[in-house]
Image (cartoon, grey):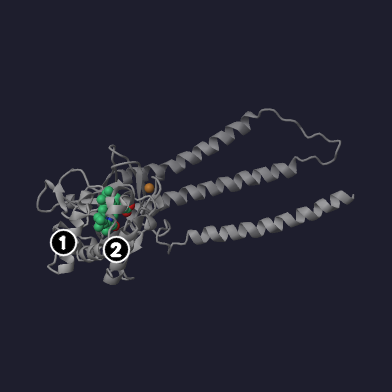
Amino acid sequence: MHSSNTKLIRFNKIPKTAFLLSLALLTLLLTACYPDHNQSTFDPQGPVALKQLEVFWWILIGGFIVFVLVEAALIYAIFKFRVKNESDIPVQTQGNHKLEIIWTAIPAVLLIILMVPTIQTLFYMYEAPKTTKPEHTLEAIGHQWWFEVRYPDPTNSEKEIVTANEVYIPVGYPVAINLESVDVIHSFWVPKLAGKTDMVPSEGNFMWFQADEPGEYYGQCAEYCGTSHANMKFKVIAVPEPDFKSWLQAQSNPALESSDPLVQEGAGVFKSAGCTGCHSIKTVVNKGSKGRVGPNLAHVGSRRDLAAGMLRNSDENGSVNDALLQKNLRTWLENPAEVKPGNLMSSGAQVYTNPDKKLTEEQISQLVHYLSSLK
Ligand SMILES: [Cu+2]
């Protein structure tokens, strides 16, 4: 008697704690899904993300109905067929063709129903709309741990314009993106515009999306690719088409080096310290040519972020803040490994691997001046 009493008390306590705990967990989960989040899939801003969200809802609601029906049947069976008194043995059933056919047929029908929107969406994603303009076809190339982006050169079909970590697109137009990788598998993901698509080395891949509103959309590598995978971010910046064209025009120009003496000295250090081994400051290259190890720096001073989203150079409205940019460049050049563990600049550039070649304070200042002037 006594022991069953204590059991009762314990059982009473567990559900309360469990209930409170699961409530707390649920709250956490729900706040993570809040559409205002920069990387929420619940706030689609273009047709592809919207279609994908619809499939999600179909599957979730379908799954929920199945869950309720199965649980109801389970609870019904537990109560209906449980032992009523100790001496009673419930009816023992072995095999029931009718039941088995029913519980095979219902899931099959449900799966067929869910298959319709799923396959429709797969076809929808598979090819960009026929109206997609060739000049809106870009290439995104995964590198450990940043993204190279290439655009067709409007003035020469044999050439491409190279940039990094910022994907400018014309708002309201479908944009086709050929995906590639130079090393391991990465995945290109802009939650508000489209689901993730793997970037497979030498196999390539394809996706398209469209942004319905101008703005900044956060992207992220979504396939584990090594040490700094979590630090491999990018931004899609959707602007009106004329602005897109003028941005591209500006990108096609090589780095503009001012005659400011500090900038000139910085340009000298850039060459003598081996930076040109991995970074180019010319953006127009032959179509399909191999990229450099590091991001193109011709217009690094106009980028909203540094090192694939690790250091923010821009104010709330998206315009680059020069003081911030200079501070970030300094932080990066002083010790890139602290900003981004494992990055291939720290491990590959002599100025970090060879203590004798370490950049001096003066050289860093000159480089900061030079790089921040590259608009
Ligand atoms: Cu990754």
Give the label, 2 or 1, closer to the camera: 2
Closest to the observer, 280 or 230: 280
Q: Is the residue marked by circle 1 packed among few (<14), some (14-19), or many (20+) residues within 10 Å? A: few
Residue 362 lies in quadrant: bottom left
| Left or right of 115 in this view: 360 | left
Q: Is the residue marked by circle 2 packed among few (<14), some (14-19), or many (20+) residues within 10 Å? A: many
Q: What residue sits right under mark 1 in the picture?
A: 250
Which residue does the image show at 29% across and 56% down from the upper left?
358
Spatial CA distance of label 2 from label 1 is 22 Å
Which residue does the image show at 65% across and 29% down from the upper left?
96
| Furthest residue in direction left, as rendered | 155
Residue 215 lies in quadrant: bottom left
**Which quarter of the rendering shows the C terminus?**
bottom left
Disc nearer the start of the sequence (2/1): 1
| Left or right of 73 in this view: 289 | left
Residue 182 visible in this rendered orientation of the protein: yes
Q: What residue sits right under mark 2 in the picture?
A: 329
Residue 324's x, y, as percent?
Answer: 31, 69
Closest to the observer, 296 or 160: 296
Which residue does the image show at 29% across and 67% down from the upper left?
325
Residue 46's x, y, as percent?
Answer: 33, 57
Closest to the observer, 197 or 163: 163
| Amino acid residing under circle 2 | Leu
Which residue does the image show at 82% across and 41% down from the upper left?
84
